[in-house]
Image: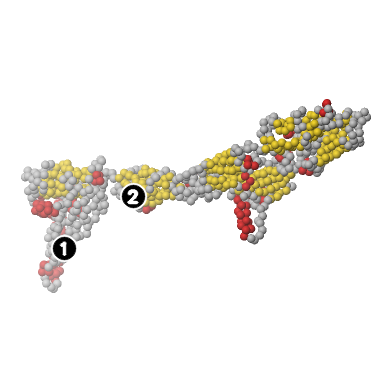
């Protein structure tokens, strides 16, 4: 079962202030440094074997694991962590000898990463050795030559076995098969290893036995123990009494790493006192592993040790192996060689990105960890000391952590609208000479938050739309931009209200939510609405949403869609009224004594349009006597162009056209009948001249009128007689005398309609309209011929009453309202002008005969 051990930093004791300060500093350092967790397991564990409860040791509960996302750094594949329970398991077979070689300790270090918040923990797993390797000899047979003259007690070193394990598992003991001539002795070295030596127990006699075969067994200290054997073959020879002797027992050398192949490392030397072949010494490796033979070679005759492969301090910084010298007689001696490799700054720092939190929100607070790095240099000493820095313009900084780890944190506010991503380069330098450096680029994307409201291109828009537009016509297109991205930058448009409120202005236009186009909901009428204001709100799709408002002012442009309307003279009667309309057709009476410039009448017209479309001009297009009359171009006044002559026809028909200045121009016509007569008696025959059909109709109408008048007169006389008789029957003064005190005339004054003082009528007209007739008292004198009661339209279609003098007063009746009359709010231009007061006084004398004739005619027709 795996053994786990966790390193903890305990607080120092004591109550002194100094101890408290030290404790505080220690706590702060502990919060900044990552915690280290250690486990120990045996090598050769199967895949899936439990190493330890990593999550629990890191202080994470099972409920936190999904959110914290516990994982291991990517550069190690020996272990894996279970995402459900957080336990650490073996991912592949671990062979300590393969991973760490002959090192006394062996461990694997890696990092455990957790998110939310981002943190890093250092984990170290020690690999403990098991006795899985048996002692091994380099050769299957050891050849020894011993002279028969060798005295008992002589010792002959034997090859040492090699065990790849460490510790007790590599501690070897040796055994030799029993033989009366030889025994085994073990010589302990300074390192604790035991050197086997063959001891001659009794003298040899070549003639009796020329060779011996023994078995040397090496047994390690493991449980259970493992062993290895080698056959020792001894040949008894003639006299060779001096073995080779090395000048040193241990040869040491210090060399630089990265030496080229063939470089001399050191030279060993052994001497032999014998002469001839017995004194010739040759050198070779003793029992050494294959890795030594791959890196070094020994010259057989000279004893020079040279390199055959590259030496790398980072792989191994010390090599210890044995050499042997052998003379021609077969005598052997051994020595040790220790080669120390000196480090060179040949490794640049290595940067490993453990984790990158990308994208990071632009509202992340200062100090947010965005990346975890691990920087290591395989060199030693100053060559392996590394410093890191960031290059590039970005609000980021790098902070050193424990175990060669670094954190990249935000050092300022992030703004995606200014920079959607940040590219920085992590530069790591060591302190070697010359210094080596390496770099790694980090790309950090900044995610958007809804921190910008839409901004309109203009705070206030103006749009101009001609009236009578088609429903759905484009009015204006507004546009707002949002610096945010995605849904936060997707702008929608809405109507937020207007000058008449959302309920009043909004129905006139609508806005398309995506494009910001304003469309007219219906046809606009300049005469009803000249301008209006709507508020358009632009809102993004963020949560919470942000919005801004712009004002759109829409001006309706006038079109010439209203023809002039003639107020005086009244338009001619329709076809259904042709029979009886001749008598009431508008006419003017002009005395034959009228001079040139005599004011006959005034054509009054209005136009509901505005501007040039409402500028009116008057033109006489048809007249019985074209040279007799003229009309004012802008005033509409009809005047005599010359003095009226005796030869001029008594009946004159004038047709004037009223035309506006629109494009195209619209017009209306006014027909005016003029009678040239000095008195009523002269005018009646002229007016009675009608076509045959009209005279017959008039005669028939006259018959019925006379009949009705006779009946009414008879009823009146009868009622008066009855009233007189009733009065006479009563006592009292005569009713005739009381009648003398009765009021003969009505006190009610003439009623005046409202002045046409707005729209296209900048001049005032006072139209005299009599009020309804009052009831006559029963005994009153018969009233004089009543004033004809005419409506406002009849008066406008007839003659204007005499305008009262400024000093006079009149009783005012109720004004007559005409629902069909144009609204006074229209801004047209009136084509008539005010009668000048002096001109009226000057013309009163000329008009009086005319008015007398007109009054008599109207009384007759009524």
Q: Is residue 426 above or below residue 802?
A: above
> Farthest residue in the right direction?
208
Q: Quadrant of residue 306?
A: top right
Task: Characterize the local packing of mark 2: few (<14), some (14-19) or many (20 or more) Cα atoms within 10 angstroms.
Answer: some
**Foreground of the two, 839 or 448:** 448
Q: Which residue is mark 1?
A: 747
Per the image, label 1 sits on a secondary structure element best described as: loop
Q: Nearer the viewer, mark 2 or mark 1?
A: 2
Picture residue at 31% right of the left edge, 44% below the top = 466
* Residue 734 visible in the picture: yes
Q: How is the image coloured?
A: secondary structure
Q: Which residue is mark 2?
A: 532
**Foreground of the two, 139 or 211:** 211
* Residue 703 visible in the picture: no
Picture residue at 67% right of the left edge, 35% below the top = 257
569 left or right, relative to 338: left
Q: Position of residue 440 (x, y in %)?
A: 57, 39
Task: Characterize the local packing of mark 1: few (<14), some (14-19) or many (20 or more) Cα atoms within 10 angstroms.
Answer: few
Picture residue at 64% right of the left edge, 39% below the top = 379
Q: Quadrant of residue 475?
A: top left
327 left or right, relative to 65: right
807 left or right, relative to 358: left
Q: Position of residue 717 (x, y in %)?
A: 13, 62
**Foreground of the two, 443 or 709:** 443
């Amino acid at each position: 079962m795996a053994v786990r051990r966790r390193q903890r930093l305990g607080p120092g004791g004591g109550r002194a202030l100094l101890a408290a300060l030290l404790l505080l500093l220690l706590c702060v350092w502990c919060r900044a440094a990552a915690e280290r967790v250690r486990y120990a397991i045996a090598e050769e564990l199967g895949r899936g074997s439990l190493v330890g409860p990593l999550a629990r040791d890191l202080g994470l509960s099972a409920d936190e694991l999904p959110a914290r996302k516990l994982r291991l750094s990517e550069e190690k594949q020996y272990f894996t962590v279970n995402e459900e329970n957080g336990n650490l398991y073996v991912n592949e077979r671990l062979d300590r000898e393969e991973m760490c070689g002959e090192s006394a300790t062996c461990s694997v270090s890696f990092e455990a990463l957790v998110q939310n918040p981002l943190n890093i923990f250092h984990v170290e797993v020690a690999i403990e050795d098991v006795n899985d390797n048996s002692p091994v000899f380099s050769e299957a047979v050891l050849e020894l030559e011993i002279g028969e003259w060798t005295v008992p007690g002589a010792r002959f070193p034997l090859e040492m076995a090699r065990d790849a394990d460490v510790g007790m598992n590599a501690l070897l003991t040796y055994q030799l098969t029993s033989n009366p001539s030889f025994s085994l002795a073990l010589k302990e070295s300074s390192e604790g290893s035991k050197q086997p030596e063959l001891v001659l127990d009794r003298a040899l006699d070549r003639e009796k036995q020329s060779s011996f075969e023994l078995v040397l067994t090496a047994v390690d200290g493991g449980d259970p123990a493992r062993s290895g054997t080698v056959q020792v073959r001894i040949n008894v020879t003639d006299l060779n009494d001096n073995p080779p002797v090395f000048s040193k027992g241990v040869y040491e050398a210090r060399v630089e790493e990265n030496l080229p192949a063939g470089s001399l490392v050191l030279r060993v030397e052994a001497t032999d006192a014998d002469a001839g072949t017995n004194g010739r010494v040759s050198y070779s490796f003793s029992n050494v592993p294959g890795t030594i033979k791959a890196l070094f070679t020994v010259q057989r005759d000279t004893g020079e040790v040279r390199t055959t492969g590259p030496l790398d301090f980072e792989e191994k910084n010390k090599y210890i192996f044995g050499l042997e010298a052998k003379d021609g007689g077969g005598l052997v001696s051994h020595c040790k060689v220790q080669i120390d490799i000196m480090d060179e700054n040949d490794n640049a720092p290595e940067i490993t990105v453990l984790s990158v939190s990308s994208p990071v929100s632009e509202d992340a607070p200062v100090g947010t960890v965005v990346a975890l790095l691990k920087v290591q240099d395989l060199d030693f000493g100053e060559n392996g000391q590394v410093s890191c820095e960031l290059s590039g313009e970005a609000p980021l900084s790098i902070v050193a952590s424990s175990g060669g780890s670094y954190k990249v944190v935000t050092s300022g506010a992030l703004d995606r609208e200014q920079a959607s991503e940040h590219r920085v380069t992590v530069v790591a330098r060591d302190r070697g000479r010359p210094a080596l450096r390496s770099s790694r680029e980090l790309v950090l994307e900044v995610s958007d938050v809804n921190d910008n409201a839409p901004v309109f291109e203009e705070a206030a828009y103006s749009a101009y739309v001609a009236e009578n537009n088609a429903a759905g016509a484009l009015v204006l297109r507004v546009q707002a931009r949002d610096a945010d991205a995605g849904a936060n930058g997707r702008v929608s448009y809405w109507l937020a209200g207007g000058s008449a409120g959302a309920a009043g202005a909004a129905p006139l236009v609508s806005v398309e939510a995506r494009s910001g186009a304003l469309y007219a909901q219906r046809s606009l009428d300049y005469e009803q609405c000249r301008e209006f204001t709507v508020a358009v709100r632009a809102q993004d799709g963020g949560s919470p949403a942000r919005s801004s408002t712009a004002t759109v002012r829409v001006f309706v442009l006038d079109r010439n869609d209203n023809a002039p309307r003639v107020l005086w003279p009244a338009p001619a009667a329709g076809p259904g009224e042709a029979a009886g309309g001749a008598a009431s057709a508008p006419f003017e009476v002009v005395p034959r004594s009228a001079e040139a410039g005599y004011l006959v009448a005034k054509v009054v017209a209005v136009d509901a349009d505005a501007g040039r479309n409402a500028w009116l001009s008057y033109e006489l297009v048809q007249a019985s006597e074209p040279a007799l009359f003229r009309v004012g171009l802008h005033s509409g006044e009809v005047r005599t162009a010359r003095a009226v002559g005796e030869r001029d026809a008594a009946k004159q028909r004038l047709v004037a056209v009223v035309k506006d200045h629109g494009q195209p121009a619209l017009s209306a016509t006014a027909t005016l009948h003029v009678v040239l007569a000095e008195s009523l008696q002269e005018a009646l025959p002229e007016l009675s001249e009608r076509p045959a059909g009209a005279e017959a109709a008039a005669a028939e109408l006259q018959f019925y009128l006379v009949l009705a008048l006779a009946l009414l007169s008879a009823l009146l006389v009868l009622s008066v007689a009855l009233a007189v008789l009733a009065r006479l029957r009563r006592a009292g003064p005569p009713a005739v005398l009381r009648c003398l005190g009765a009021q003969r005339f009505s006190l009610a004054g003439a009623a005046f309609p409202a002045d046409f003082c707005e729209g296209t009528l900048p001049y005032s007209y006072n139209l005299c309209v009599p009020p309804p007739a009052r009831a006559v008292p029963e005994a009153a004198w018969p009233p004089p011929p009543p004033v004809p009661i005419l409506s406002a339209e009849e008066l406008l279609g007839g003659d204007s009453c005499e305008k009262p003098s400024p000093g006079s007063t009149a009783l005012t009746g109720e004004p007559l309202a005409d629902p069909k009359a144009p609204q006074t709010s229209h801004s047209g231009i009136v084509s008539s002008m005010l009668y000048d007061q002096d001109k009226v006084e000057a013309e009163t004398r000329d008009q009086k005969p005319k008015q007398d004739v007109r009054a008599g005619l109207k009384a007759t027709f009524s």
